[in-house]
Amino acid sequence: MKLVIIGLIVHVYTGIGRVALDVRLGCLSGNLTPDSEPQKIIDAAKFALRNVAVLELKAPYWRYVPTPLWSRYVRNMDYFIEICMKYIDAAMERLRTKKAINEFDLSLVERILAKETDPKMAYILALDLILVGIDTISMAVCSILYQLATRPEEQEKIYQELVEILPDPSVPLNTNHLDKAIYMKAFVREVFRVYSTVIGNGRTLQNDTTICGYKVPKGVQVVFPTVVTGNMEQYVTDAKTFKPMRWLKESSDESLHPFASLPYGHGARMCLGRRFADLEIQVLLAKLIRSYKLEYHHKPLKYKVTFMYAPDGELKFKVLQR
Ligand code: HEM
């Protein structure tokens, strides 16, 4: 069973590779050896995100002397840069030899390269997407699957919705199907409200500002802890109850402040990958829950903040074919 879940998580690596580097990274292949490229990419992404908080939030000795963690972090980033350059260069070569240049025939990377003569932009974009796009979705998926497995009634409602939308599970999934998966999407929103994978976001104030009567001077970092506000009775009626229905139009919920739960942030700097992440999560859930039932029969897991907020422990699910 563990293999199924690991498969789901590496599915995220493969998806991001397709978007950011125009290549299937091969992370889904079985029996990856420790020195294979896909396995090294998985390890490097994990290392980067697990240690960025340690470097940023603990005493920054690395600013003065290159500590072992800092040196390893830099080597790790160099590896990412090498990977990004290798695949972006290959995409440039493909673009040069491509015959018909109809925009619709081009991948995302090719579209950028067709307009941007400096490959540096494409390297940076690829690097950004790879770094922030992997752990976020995989951690969110871990959290959502854990909630599904431990809430059988909710899972059943989602399954029934999917059976109605996709009576034949072998029919390829399309956007029309996903548009109708209203309860499934409400469930994901509710998981994000209660257990927001990214616990908050921050802004450095450009001007002196008054917020809720507090005078906050320019230059101060203001943090918006969405995992806290999303669980406050003041902004969400019956906040302690897990209730996906509250996200549906017909819900009579009295209060759900539009800014209470912002799992992808807000404004000009909100998450760039939001649509991609939502789509990836929806496709994965629709395919999985339409055909399998998830159960969890072990010790309840506590949530822990690493860089992300996710269940702490092994996700030992029992996966039963429907
Ligand atoms: C469930 C998955 C994800 C969650 C919960 C998430 C959440 C967030 C949050 C909270 C921010 C900060 C927004 C703000 O400050 O207002 C952010 C920024 C960002 N995210 Fe995501 N993200 C996810 C997946 C992704 C993916 C898959 C990509 C790329 C394909 C991505 C790319 C970015 C980028 C580039 C930024 C920085 C935007 C900027 O500063 O202008 N994210 N994300």
Image (tube, rainbow, N blue to C red):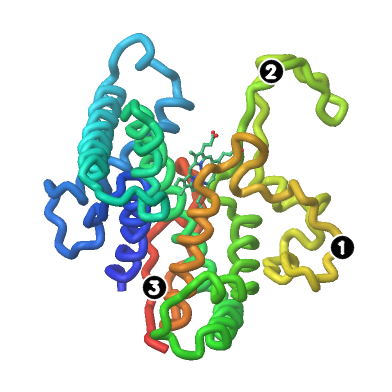
Marks 2 and 3: which is nearer the front? 2
- Quadrant containing the C terminus is bottom left
Q: Earlier in the sequence, mark 2 or mark 3?
A: 2
Q: Please report the residue visible at 56 percent of the width from the left and 74 percent of the height from the top.
A: 176
What type is the residue that disc 3 sits on?
Phe
- CA–CA distance between discs 1 and 2? 35 Å
Q: In the rendered image, which quarter is residue 51 located in?
A: top left
What type is the residue that disc 1 sits on?
Glu
Provide the secondary structure element on which disc 2 rests: loop
What type is the residue that disc 2 sits on?
Gln
Per the image, the residue denoted by label 2 is 206
Residue 77 visible somewhere in the drawing: yes
Q: Please report the residue visible at 35 percent of the width from the left and 9 percent of the height from the top.
A: 64
Provide the secondary structure element on which disc 1 rests: loop
Q: Position of residue 257 (x, y in %)?
A: 80, 51
Q: Please report the residue visible at 59 percent of the width from the left and 46 percent of the height from the top.
A: 264
- Quadrant containing the N terminus is bottom left
Per the image, the residue denoted by label 1 is 254
Q: Is mark 2 within 8 Å of ligand 1?
A: no
Per the image, the residue denoted by label 3 is 317
Q: Position of residue 240 (x, y in %)?
A: 72, 61
Q: Earlier in the sequence, mark 1 or mark 2?
A: 2
Residue 83 visible somewhere in the drawing: no
Say few, some or many: other residues with alpha carbon within 10 Å of mark 2 (under 14 / 14 to 19 / 20 or more). few
- CA–CA distance between discs 3 and 1? 36 Å
Q: In the rendered image, which quarter is residue 121 located in?
A: top left
Circles 3 and 1 in contact, beta carbons < 8 Å: no
Q: Is mark 3 within 8 Å of ligand 1?
A: no
Q: Please report the residue visible at 60 percent of the width from the left and 71 percent of the height from the top.
A: 179
